[in-house]
Image (tube, rainbow, N blue to C red):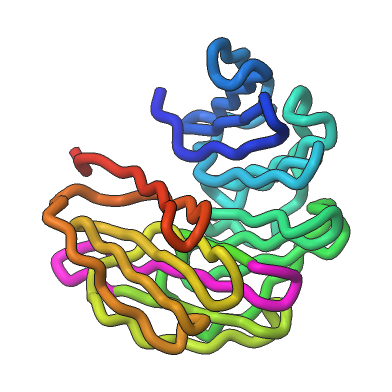
Amino acid sequence: RCLQSTTKISENSQCAVGLYGEILLTSDNGNNWINKISNTTNHLYGISAFNSTIISVGANGTILKSTDSGNSWLIKSSPSNYDLMSVKVVNENIAFACGFNGLVLKSTDGGETWLTKNTFSYEHLRGIDFVDESNGFAVGGSVGEITTSIILKTTNGGDTWSNLYSPSLNTLNAVDFFDEQFGIAVGIRGNILKTTNGGSSWTSAYTDIPHWLYSVYVISKTHIFICGGNVN
């Protein structure tokens, strides 16, 4: 089975999710992994943690929550049946998720309940990140004969979203910000975008990688990890 996303829970513990509701948990930095019961067979595409609280999202609006560091999971009610592709748990109360047809969801009670936030976009949103409760970004686009790219920004906790200019038409899959100003977005055909002014402008980073990039982790302004692979 194919794993889709992973998150760090603590110094030694990580959790990974994937297709058909698969959840794997490690407590020894990845040397050994244990299967956990997810209570769903839907594909899981995104996961995010804050302390012992973990939220995973996936196909058909699936939302799962764990409050014991990934050992047990409960299904939470979702206001949408659209696929959810990414989630960001900001703190013990605030979490955001994004998905197809411009969908953004917000929780203010630690993932127990969720409300839809209007982005006024119908593009598929594939990655989301928040610097704090107020400032966040969502990226995505559509893949087909003609690809599209979209970058959205909010400064008021998801109540309103601005459509930012993207210098590339290649669809974006993930975004990660180091602080309010410095961020990286990655996508198909080796697409890497960088901003140093909070998304006001983006520059394309040169890469000769033809593969699709699916994930980015900004450790510092000079240390960034990106992963991807062949779409086939």
Depth order, front residue of 73/81: 73
Name above or below for residue 224 compared with residue 54.
Answer: below
Image location (x, y in percent) of residue 110: 83, 54
Image location (x, y in percent) of residue 120: 53, 85
Task: Please state if 44 lies on the left or on the right of 188 as rendered.
Answer: right
Q: Residue furthest front?
A: 222
Image location (x, y in percent) of residue 96: 67, 62
Depth order, front residue of 207/53: 207
Q: Which residues are magenta?
A: 131-148
Depth order, front residue of 77/167: 167
Residue beneath the point at 79% across and 41% down: 51
Q: Quadrant of residue 74?
A: top right
Task: Please state if 72 lies on the left or on the right of 58 as rendered.
Answer: right
Name above or below for residue 40 compared with residue 91.
Answer: above
Residue 85 can be seen, yes or no? no
Residue beneath the point at 57% across and 11% down: 32
Residue beneath the point at 59% across and 26% down: 23
Q: Quadrant of residue 14?
A: top right
Magenta highlight: main SS: loop
Residue 3 is a magenta residue: no
Name above or below for residue 83 compared with residue 171.
Answer: above
Residue beneath the point at 41% across and 76% down: 195
Q: Quadrant of the C terminus?
A: top left
Image location (x, y in percent) of residue 57: 60, 47
